[in-house]
Image (spheres, helix red, strand yellow):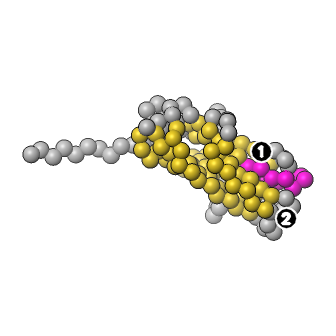
């Protein structure tokens, strides 16, 4: 009997973050852009073109765990929404929460089947009546990620 050992598969995955705060306009969704990569296996993200997207690379179709974390500046008015969208269409996951006193953090995740060239974005919404920043911080930076869990 011969034992064959195969090398580990390099599933596509990326985790990106902000290094600069972005401003959300009241009553509008902001597709959050990301200017830094913690890691990017498979070329899923580009920091200069469509930096708000994580894109499934060739050969990367499958089930993905998709998630993100957004930190809003302090404002006690209205509510906040974060959502994940596929290919600029309908939301594939969303979360709504009332405003709180102090900086507000929201996280979201979902498992979702994606095909080659599909892309996902994370969006932030607020309705304070004025502009509100999506913050950057060392401990709780605004981040976005996906990891392929299995083949299609």
Q: Quadrant of residue 2?
A: top left
Residue at image position (52%, 38%) is: 114
Residue at image position (80%, 63%) is: 99
Can residue 136 be seen here?
A: no
Measured as percent of width and height from the top left, residue 139 is found at 63, 64
In this image, 63 relative to 8: left or right?
A: right
Residue at image position (73%, 49%) is: 124
Measured as percent of width and height from the top left, residue 33 is found at 68, 43
Secondary structure under the numbered disc 2 in the rendered image = loop
Indicate yes or no whether the magenta region holds residue 64. no
Can residue 148 be seen here?
A: yes
In this image, 25 relative to 52: left or right?
A: right
Q: Quadrant of the N terminus?
A: top left
Q: Which residue is mark 1?
A: 29
Furthest-bottom residue in this view: 101
**Which stretch is magenta?**
124-134
Q: Which residue is mark 2?
A: 76
Query: Relative to 77, does residue 112 appear above or below in the rendering?
Result: above
Indicate yes or no whether the magenta region holds residue 126. yes
Total marks in image? 2
Q: Quadrant of the C terminus?
A: top left
């Amino acid at each position: 009997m011969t034992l064959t050992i195969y090398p580990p598969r390099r599933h596509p995955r990326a985790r990106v973050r902000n290094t600069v705060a972005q401003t959300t306009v009241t009553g509008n969704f902001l597709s959050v852009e990301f200017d830094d990569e913690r890691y990017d296996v498979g070329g899923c993200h580009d920091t200069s073109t469509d930096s708000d997207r994580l894109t499934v690379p060739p050969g990367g179709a499958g089930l993905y765990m998709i998630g993100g974390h957004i930190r809003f500046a302090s404002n006690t008015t209205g509510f906040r929404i974060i959502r994940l969208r596929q290919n600029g269409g309908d939301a594939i996951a969303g979360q709504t929460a009332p405003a709180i006193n102090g900086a507000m953090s929201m996280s979201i995740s979902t498992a979702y089947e994606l095909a080659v060239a599909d892309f996902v974005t994370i969006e932030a919404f607020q309705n304070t009546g004025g502009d509100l920043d999506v913050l950057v911080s060392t401990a709780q930076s605004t981040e976005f990620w996906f990891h392929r869990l299995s083949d299609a």
